[in-house]
Structures are given as C-alpha cells and as structure tokens.
Amino acid sequence: MARRPTKNAPMPQPMMRPWMARVTALALLGLVVFAIFSLAIQPLHQSYARVDDALEETATLKAKYEGIAASRKALEKQLKTLRARQNKSGFYLEGTTNALAGAALQEKVSSVVEAADGQLRSVQSLPGSEEKNFEKVGVRVQMIVTVEELYDVLYELEAGETFLFVENLDIRGQRSRRRNQDNNEAPELAVRFDLSGFLRPKAS
C-alpha cells in the first residue's frame, strides 16, 4: 500500500513553458537595450546636438563678421573722403582768430543776401564765447527781404558745408512792398537774427 506524503515534503515545481521563457528573455533584452541607450547613446546624441548648435552659431557669427570686414574698405574710403573735405574747408569757420573768422562770416552773409536779392541793413560782430572747448564766433544780421528771399537766405546759410547756426530770429512786417517777377506786390519783412559758427580747434 502506497505511503501518503507527509506535510513537510516539498511540492514539485511546475515547469516554465517555452513561450513564457522567450517572452521573459525578450523583456530582459529590451531592458538591457534601454539601459544602454539611456546611459550611453542618449547622452552622446545630446552632445552631438549641442555641437551642431554651436557650429551653427559659429557659422552665423562668421558670416556676420565677414560682412563687417567686407564693408570696412568702403567705410575707410568714406572716412578718408570726409577727412579730406574737413581739412580742405571743413565744418569750421575760415580763419585762425575770432577777428578773421568774424570778417569771413560777415562777407559770407553779405554775398548770400545779395545773391537772394535782399537788402542788407547791417552786420555786426558779436563778442566771442566758448562752448564745450570750442570757440564760438557770431554776427548779428539785419536785412529787408520778402518771404521767398528769407527762405533762400536761411537755406543757403544753414545748408552749406560749414556748420552755421541761426539764433534769435525776429521777423516783422514792413509797409513797403516790392514787385516780384510776376509783377505782383510782395510784402517786405524786417528780419534780424544772430548767425554763429565755430573756429577749428587748435591741435594739442
């Protein structure tokens, strides 16, 4: 008669089926591949991406600096021309002293008013002054002009190569009238203003 198994005897383990073994092996392989990708391949890919960004930024900066370098010659040529113009007549008044510059300024005012067909009443020199280390020279002008002549005078004075500044402009109407080129009566204006410029700075 067969003996009954005791309670302490080990139970027989069931055998793992073949398909379950394959699934487990594939799962373990997937975990290994994921671990390799996370620990090695992904950081390497991110590093390459950063290198690509740096190369792209470098190429952009290179193109920008090449453009600046290409325009350097043109800028140097413009600067050379500007300096030549400044050395020739420049932005400053002609003359090395206040008296000479004032005389040249009076002569310029006379020629401009005459060319505009205006009537110059007087040109008086103003006391010299200094503004931000520049010596200022000025004259006070009084003239009789029409509106069109006033426009021509002011434009010619302020649009020239020499820097001239019109200040304290005072305009008053006159009773007398002149006929213009169309035989129309043009009202005359009594105009007074101060005109100033600057002497060329002395070389230190």
Image (tube, rainbow, N blue to C red):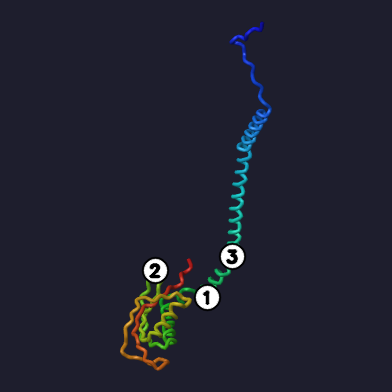
Q: Residues within 10 Å of mark 3 (few under 14, many from 20)?
A: few
Residue 95: in sight, yes or no? no
x, y percentage for residue 75? 56, 67
Camera-side residue of 178 and 60: 60
Q: Is residue 46 above or below residue 58?
A: above
Camera-side residue of 12 and 178: 12
Name the image quarter holding residue 145.
bottom left
Depth check, mark 3 against mark 2: the one in front is 3
Which three-letter amino acid code belongs to the residue tagged 2?
Answer: Glu
Which three-letter amino acid code belongs to the residue tagged 1?
Answer: Lys
Measure the C-alpha gap from mark 1 to mark 2: 24 Å
Residue 111 left/right relative to 188: right
Which three-letter amino acid code belongs to the residue tagged 3?
Answer: Ser
The residue indicated by pointer 1 is: 88
Measure the C-alpha gap from mark 3 to mark 1: 26 Å
Camera-side residue of 178 and 125: 178
Measure the C-alpha gap from mark 3 to mark 2: 36 Å
Q: Earlier in the sequence, mark 3 or mark 2?
A: 3
The residue indicated by pointer 3 is: 71
Name the image quarter holding residue 4.
top right
x, y percentage for residue 33? 64, 35
